[in-house]
């Protein structure tokens, strides 16, 4: 696209607050299918090597609808924890899909009969659960766009504590070393006590006048909390005391307008062997030394999807839904897969010898890790954008758990 047209499209997706923009799927120009959209929607036949199996399927409220959301399940303690944006939180048995308990965090008035009708039709004020869930210490943790952070008992669903933080919680928490690390849209990362919810420390980063709607989910490892910022930096904070170990600029704003200067690191940092891997929205993929913050190598890839890894390979889904395999040691590109361009793919998650990613029309796609070839496909959303997949599947062994925009939770096995 030419620059003026690109700028016009970006301006059309400005958030109501005037301070953030949302990714491509919120662009009003995609609401009415044109010839190009119809072409993207048509999938080319593939030589399928296997047929994925749906083990079970359950409804999770009304899903997230048309809202920006990275809400995804958590799998732990032989359970699958899932939620919808309105406020329903459900625990399922991981093997059978049987519902174990259910909570509703939507807000209703106490007006007797009218309150009962509101609950029946789920018309109360939405809790606005967002970002995703994390399970640890016999608890499941999640946050909301209202700035609430909640901890539930994994066996009963009982609320153990609820804390308030400044800013929207749009990313899943990280849990380690007795702390729950929560990043917010206000540019503040909070550390809360995992048992009580009491604030232990906070780290505040600069937020430019214009940024992406999403935020970086924190990563906790090796005694540090790692997070990407809206100003293009990677930061490591010492878990024990909240002191900053280092900040490293991965990319720097360029251009005359705020649109040109978008440099958000909008992903969860990935760490292995003392090296952190991050990618920015403006096009910088980097490997950074954990101990010092030294940049080991950089490559030109533009993404707001989580990087994944298996063995010595990194997998990146760029902003155009092209999938890449790279050598994590030097960033050398090994292969690329561009046949799903424009389908708004999720991150590509390793499962066995394959990668799996969802798309905005509700399809799951399997790729060979070795060469990126498409080897299997499964329709889980009815070929409709309202039933599509925006958050990457959660993988446990050979089974993945995916949640569609309309709240369909599926357990799917890869042979």
Image (cartoon, rainbow, N blue to C red):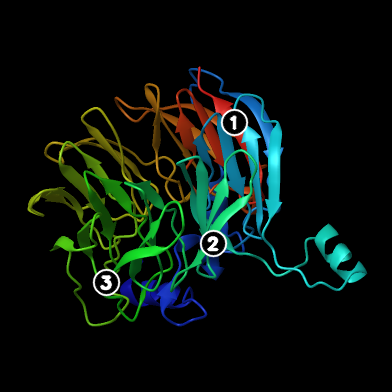
- Where is residue 404 shown, x and y percent of the image? 61, 46
Q: CA distance from mark 3 to mark 2?
A: 24 Å
- Discs 3, 2 touching: Cβ within 8 Å: no
Crowding near the residue tagged with mark 1, few <14, some 14–19, many ≥20 C-alpha atoms within 10 Å: many
Q: Secondary structure at mark 3?
A: loop
Residue under the image location 55 percent in, 47 percent down: 389
Query: Dot 2, crowdedness within 10 Å: few (<14), some or many (≥20)?
Result: some
Q: Examine the rendering and report whether any part of residue 125 can be seen.
A: yes
Residue 86 versus residue 138: which sits nearer the camera? Answer: 138
Q: Which residue is mark 2?
A: 162
Q: Residue at x 43, y 72 (%)?
A: 21
User: Which residue position holds label 3?
Assistant: 205
**Separation of marks 2 and 1 at Cα, in angstroms:** 30 Å
Q: CA distance from mark 1 to mark 3?
A: 38 Å
**Which of disc 1 and disc 2 is earlier in sequence?**
2
Question: Residue at the location (29% across, 60% down)?
Answer: 265
- Name the front one of labels 1 and 3: 3
Q: Earlier in the sequence, mark 3 or mark 2?
A: 2
To which quarter of the image does residue 362 belong?
Answer: top right
Residue 152, position as x, y percentages in the image: 57, 49
Work out which residue is located at the far front of the displayed protein and give it: 196
Quarter placement of the N terminus: bottom left
Q: Which mark is residue 411?
A: 1
| 231 left or right, relative to 397 | left
């Amino acid at each position: 696209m030419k620059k003026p047209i690109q700028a016009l499209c970006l301006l059309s997706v400005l958030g109501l607050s005037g301070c953030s923009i949302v990714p491509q799927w919120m662009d009003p120009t995609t609401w009415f299918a044109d010839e190009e959209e119809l072409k993207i929607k048509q999938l080319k036949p593939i030589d399928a090597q296997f047929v994925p199996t749906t083990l079970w399927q359950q409804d999770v409220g009304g899903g997230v609808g048309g809202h920006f959301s990275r809400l995804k399940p958590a799998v732990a303690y032989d359970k699958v924890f899932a939620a919808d944006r309105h406020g329903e939180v459900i625990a399922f048995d991981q093997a059978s899909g049987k519902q174990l308990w259910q909570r509703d965090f939507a807000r209703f008035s106490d007006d007797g009969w009218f309150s009962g009708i509101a609950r029946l039709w789920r018309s109360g004020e939405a809790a606005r659960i967002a970002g995703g869930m994390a399970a640890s210490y016999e608890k499941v943790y999640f946050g909301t766009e209202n700035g609430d952070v909640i901890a539930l008992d994994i066996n009963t669903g009982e609320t153990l504590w609820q804390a308030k933080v400044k800013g929207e919680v749009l990313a899943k928490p990280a849990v380690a070393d007795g702390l729950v690390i929560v990043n917010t849209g206000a540019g503040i990362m909070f550390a809360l006590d995992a048992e009580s919810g009491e604030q232990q420390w906070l780290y505040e980063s600069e937020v430019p006048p214009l940024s992406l709607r999403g935020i970086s989910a924190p990563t906790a490892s090796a005694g540090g909390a790692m997070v990407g910022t809206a100003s293009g930096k990677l930061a490591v904070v010492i878990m024990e005391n909240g002191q900053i170990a280092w900040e490293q600029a991965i990319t720097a704003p360029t251009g005359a307008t705020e649109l040109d200067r978008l440099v958000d690191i909008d992903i969860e940092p990935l760490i292995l062997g003392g090296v952190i891997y991050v990618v920015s929205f403006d096009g910088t993929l980097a490997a950074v030394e954990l101990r010092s913050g030294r940049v080991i190598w950089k490559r030109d890839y533009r993404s707001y999807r989580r990087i994944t890894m298996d063995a010595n390979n990194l997998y990146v889904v760029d902003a155009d839904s092209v999938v890449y395999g790279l050598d994590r040691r030097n960033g050398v590109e090994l292969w690329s897969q561009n046949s799903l361009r424009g389908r708004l793919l999720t991150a590509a998650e390793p499962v066995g010898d394959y990668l799996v990613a969802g798309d905005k029309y509700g399809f799951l796609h399997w790729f060979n890790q070795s060469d990126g070839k498409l080897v299997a496909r499964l329709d889980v959303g009815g070929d409709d954008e309202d039933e599509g997949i925006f958050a990457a599947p959660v993988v446990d062994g050979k089974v993945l758990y995916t949640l569609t925009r309309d709240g369909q939770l599926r357990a799917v096995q890869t042979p």
